[in-house]
Image (spheres, grey):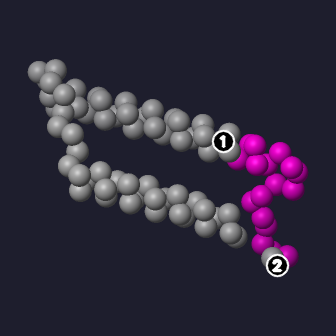
Amino acid sequence: MTENEQSIVPADEGWRSRTILTGGLIGAVLGLLSAYLYVRTAEETHRSGEAPEAPATGEAVKLGVTLLTIMRTITEWGRR
């Protein structure tokens, strides 16, 4: 690392616990927000109270690949 670069990893030993806790909280909040938005949109679209159709397999795979790409990007940040 050069003099101008700064590490985002704190020097103290508690950074692991804080990072895992922060990541878990962010993931939980994003998961809850996503579920809320999904339910709200489904209720607005299907006024009769019926459940929406399940996503097609291709759509679920596409979402999975997108999530894996995000996880890979975050993992790459740890290599810096």
Q: Is residue 21 depicted above or below 15 in this figure?
A: above
For this view, does 32 lie left or right of residue 2?
Answer: left
For this view, does 73 lie left or right of residue 18?
Answer: left
Q: Which residues are magenta?
A: 3-19
Residue under the image location 45 percent in, 32 percent down: 32
Disc 1 residue type?
Thr
The mark closer to the camera, 2 or 1, is: 1
Q: Residue furthest right?
A: 12
Mark 2 crowdedness (10 Å alpha carbons): few <14, some 14-19, many ≥20: few
Residue 18 in the magenta stretch? The answer is: yes
Residue 72 x %, y %: 53, 63
Residue 79 x %, y %: 68, 69
**Image disc number at residue 22:** 1
For this view, does 58 lie left or right of residue 25?
Answer: left
Q: Is residue 18 depicted above or below 32 in this figure?
A: below
Residue 45 in the magenta stretch? The answer is: no
Give the residue number, with chain letter if any, for mark 2.
2
Q: Quadrant of residue 39?
A: top left
Residue under the image location 52 percent in, 35 percent down: 29
Q: Does label 2 or label 1 sit earlier along the sequence?
A: 2
Q: Is residue 21 depicted above or below 6 in this figure?
A: above
Disc 2 residue type?
Thr
Residue under the image location 23 percent in, 52 percent down: 57
Residue under the image location 87 percent in, 56 percent down: 11
Q: Is residue 27 depicted above or below 3 in this figure?
A: above
Q: CA distance from mark 2 to mark 1?
A: 28 Å
Secondary structure that dominates the magenta span: loop
Q: Quadrant of the N terminus?
A: bottom right
